[in-house]
Image (spheres, helix red, strand yellow):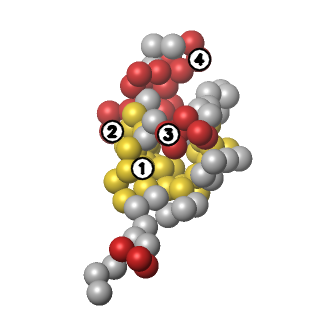
Amino acid sequence: MQKIIHVTPLKDYQLKLEFQNQETRIFDTKPYLDKGIFVELKNIEYFNKARIFFDSIAWPNGQDFDPDCLYIESRVIESPISDHSLPL
């Protein structure tokens, strides 16, 4: 499991997530917005209150996502470069 170190709410109900492994990923919450407690996230002002909570993110009324779900279901936009991939 990768720990989230920073979250930024974006337009269109997406979250920019920065992980401890230096990856930056985008997580789309739209597939969840019609389900149970996540309906409240449709209010963009409330959605923008996303904060780091332990190893994941959460909102004031208790909505949260499993950290593994956030990592697996997000797409990479930045990844650290390893030494072995640098040109010689």
Name the kind of residue labelled 3 in the image.
Ile
Name the kind of residue labelled 1 in the image.
Arg
Who is closer to the viewer here, 12 or 73?
73
Label 2: which residue? Answer: 11
Name the kind of residue labelled 2 in the image.
Lys
Determine crowd level at label 3: few under 14, some 14-19, many 20+ residues with C-alpha closer than 10 A.
Answer: few
Who is closer to the viewer here, 21 or 37?
21
Nearer-N-terminus badge (3/4): 4
Count of picture labels:
4
Mark number displayed over residue 37? 4
Mark number displayed over residue 72? 3
Say which of marks 4 and 1 sits in front. Answer: 1
Q: Is residue 57 above or below residue 6?
A: above
Q: Is residue 75 above or below residue 20?
A: above
Determine crowd level at label 2: few under 14, some 14-19, many 20+ residues with C-alpha closer than 10 A.
Answer: few
Label 1: which residue? Answer: 25
